[in-house]
Image (spheres, rainbow, N blue to C red):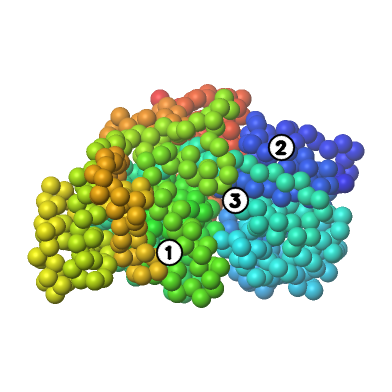
Amino acid sequence: MARTLAGSTERPSIDAILKRHFGFQSFRPLQREIIESLLAGEDVLALLPTGGGKSLCYQLPAVAIEGLTIVISPLIALMKDQVDSLEEIGLPATFLNSSLSPDEFRRRWRSLGSGRYKILYLAPERLVTDEMLAALDAWNVGLIAVDEAHCISEWGHDFRPEYRALAILRERFPRVPLVALTATATARVRDDIVTLLRMRQPRIHVASFNRPNLSYRIVPRLSPLKQILGILAEHRGESGIIYCMTRNRTEELEEALIHEGVLARAYHAGMESAERARRQDLFIQDQIQVIVATIAFGMGVHKPDVRFVVHHDLPKNIESYYQESGRAGRDGLPSECVLLYSRSDAARLHHLIDNITNEQEQTVARRHLTQLIEFCESPLCRRVQLLQYFGETYQGRDGRSLAACGACDNCLTPREQVDGTVEGQKILSCVLRIQQKSGFRVGLHHVVDVLCGADTEKIRRWEHQTLSTYGIGGEHTRYEWMHFARELMRLGLLRQDAERFNVLEATPTGREFLKNRARIEVNKPLVTGRLSREKREQQRKMTGAIVYDQGLFSRLREWRKSVAAERGVPAYVIFHDSTLQAIAQEKPTSRAGLARIAGLGERKLTQYGDQILAVIRDAD
């Protein structure tokens, strides 16, 4: 059984702790159940989405129980961020890692021995040293939290071998409750977490994977720089992440954005660690607007006010897309996820998959890529499809299953079905004519070149300008012909042979379609333009936007920026945007009114209440 606060005979209610220390009136889904399980001394596996409030699940019990809470985290930058936030609300916390000077390390070590701190953050490799384990035996550990627990599994998306050593925790602290937390994990990864951490009949709490404040948009990548500048114009002054497939592309895009006057920096694993840390700090401190990154910019991104995530290139799979896009809107405010889609990325990924030597891994990778392409090209609701991938049915606030979210591109601008019979006949005829003349098959781009009457070296070399199908596709653009061909693949009339460089071939069904002159319907191409003002307002409303005084909100942000600079912490450590928006909506005139705002606990009310009220008065 977890122990109560030292010297007290009765544990304060978790609702009282929630309000007093964290400033919230109610819990997010499953937080109460997880906390109650831990306070009852049980092990817990908690799967909560990014932005779902994982940290509170061990921070609140740390207040309620006697002893020290140990948090295992893989990232030094995250430790400092969390400790700064906890110190702001009056909860004594610290970390021990290589960023500290020897003198500071020893000072914190002595303070831990005297019981000054309630929470200690450690990296897994430091925790399992003999010296640290011996010290923890003496420091009265009351709770252990393993953050990013999927790192322990080889089947997780971010496996870290050093996590395997954490199995010793159960042996050294058999009676201490242990909570393993992750934002996403398949059934296999969940089983690995439980087994490898030697958890004792853990309570397993799985929250919805739905992120209701995020909107999803997939558009064809045509003029990427122009498209990205359009997205930035829609998010003027707001922070965002742009993910790219290669290191070179991050640097090229960084240069192009800087040339356009955007405060942007590239970030990838080829940089020195100190330079990566510097660039991450620039982003966290709002000194740059955009970070252009490979997936190396991953779990360390705990900036809650990222308002947009753009995928310049195709991610590896749907789970990667969910993780990377999920770094937007961690504070619960409306945020946008845009994927610039190009089939050429799929071809590149196919080539990488071809080089995988393990046959099982190669099969799994191909299946994941196929699922991702289907997700990108489907006309169905993006949110519904994402949740289906994780085995979940999308439900509205009343608990009913829904087929549309009303906030993604396919919901806001549904694609019409049109007669694609003639287009299908032209494409399939062209594929067959090329094979008959040359004795070999070709890729999609070459077929489209023939249809559009292009003058290329390959067309001249193979004399494909003499084909009856050469130049018969002048009524459509190259992009439209690419789309119609993908629709034929979706309908099973055409296939790409992944084993042979993605060359095209007509399927038996496609040959039958040509022979019988059957009629088919296809989806119109993806929408290429920006959302209209009306559609964007609908999107914001569906993702939880509130009406507030924007002038007051701007003044509050300026005040917060000055306080954060004075204290040497990121602005969101002082208050999240969601708290400032609530203040700008309610405009309280007294401390009692401020106390009803989510995110204002006793410590922050005492520290900043009068200053906030002064900003509100001055804005009137």
Measured along the vertical axis of the image, is residue 261 above or below residue 513? below
Residue 62 visible in rendering? no
Q: 89 or 504, which lies in front?
A: 504
Helix or strand or loop: what does disc 1 sit on?
Answer: loop
In terms of image quadrants, where is residue 458? bottom left
Measured along the vertical axis of the image, is residue 503 above or below residue 522? below
Residue on which the image places disc 3: 183
Residue on which the image places disc 2: 32
Q: Residue at x 43, y 64 (%)?
A: 294
Residue 423 visible in rendering? yes
Which amino acid is tagged 1? Answer: Thr
> Around disc 3, counting alpha carbons within 10 Å, would you say few (fewer than 14), some (14 to 19), or many (20 or more)?
many
Q: Earlier in the sequence, mark 2 or mark 1?
A: 2
Look at the image and tell me in which quarter the C terminus lies: top left
Residue on which the image places disc 1: 294
Q: Residue at x 83, y 38 (%)?
A: 11
